[in-house]
Image (cartoon, rainbow, N blue to C red):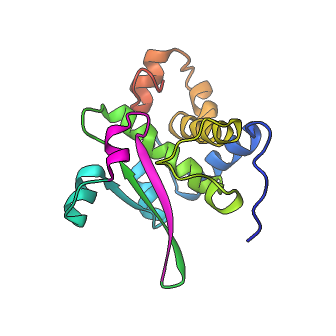
Amino acid sequence: MTIRPIPNKPRYDYVKRTARKVLLSNNIASLPTDIDAIFKNNNILLFSEIQAEQMAMCTMPHEFSINNKIQAITQNRTVQSKSIFITIYKERNRVAGNIRFSKAHELGHIFLKHFEDFEIPSSLNISTSREYWILEREAEMFAAELLAPTAILRACNCFDKRSIQLLCNLSGEAS
């Protein structure tokens, strides 16, 4: 595997195309987007922080638990020579729309091949570098397009924040 340099700016067209391909390849034909189905269809393991703690019979790393900037983490692991992704998201004191956005954001890192194409720091050691910001921005753009596809919103004449929030089951902030 060749590690490439992180792009100089977010790749808007690539991100939109990739999100649309994910919607099509997962037969997502209605809103709100079924995020959990995308995880399941692609064999990506998904756990809430509570589920992960129960399975591991221990608490999550302190850095994950106390850092409010980290809403979810994804790790790429090799198990029996096969690459798997594991996503853990926070649900305590969070509204459903924000949780959906966090999950979609993590799918962005996976489907945009951030783990494969770039050397990225651990989610637990958030960097303030411009490069890290670019990858985070791409994941945010992916999540937005996955949860609120612009072509569908245009076709529905859905342009205001409240309508998008209701139709796509998003938080006000994500809308």
| Picture residue at 70% right of the left edge, 35% below the top | 130
Magenta stretch: includes residue 63:
yes
What is the span of residues highlighted in magenta in the rendered image? 61-79
| Picture residue at 29% right of the left edge, 53% below the top | 60
| Picture residue at 43% right of the left edge, 28% below the top | 167
Expressed as whole percent of the image width and height from the top left, the position of residue 168 reads: 44, 32
Name the outermost residue toward the bottom. 80
Classify residue 16 by image quadrant.
Answer: top right
Quadrant containing the N terminus is bottom right
Residue 29 shows up from this direction: no
Please tell me how many numbered marks the rendered image carries. 0
Q: 156 or 101, which is in the foreground?
A: 101
Q: Is residue 136 left or right of residue 65?
A: right
| Picture residue at 37% right of the left edge, 46% below the top | 64
Q: 64 or 105, which is in the foreground?
A: 64
Q: 42 or 27, which is in the foreground?
A: 42
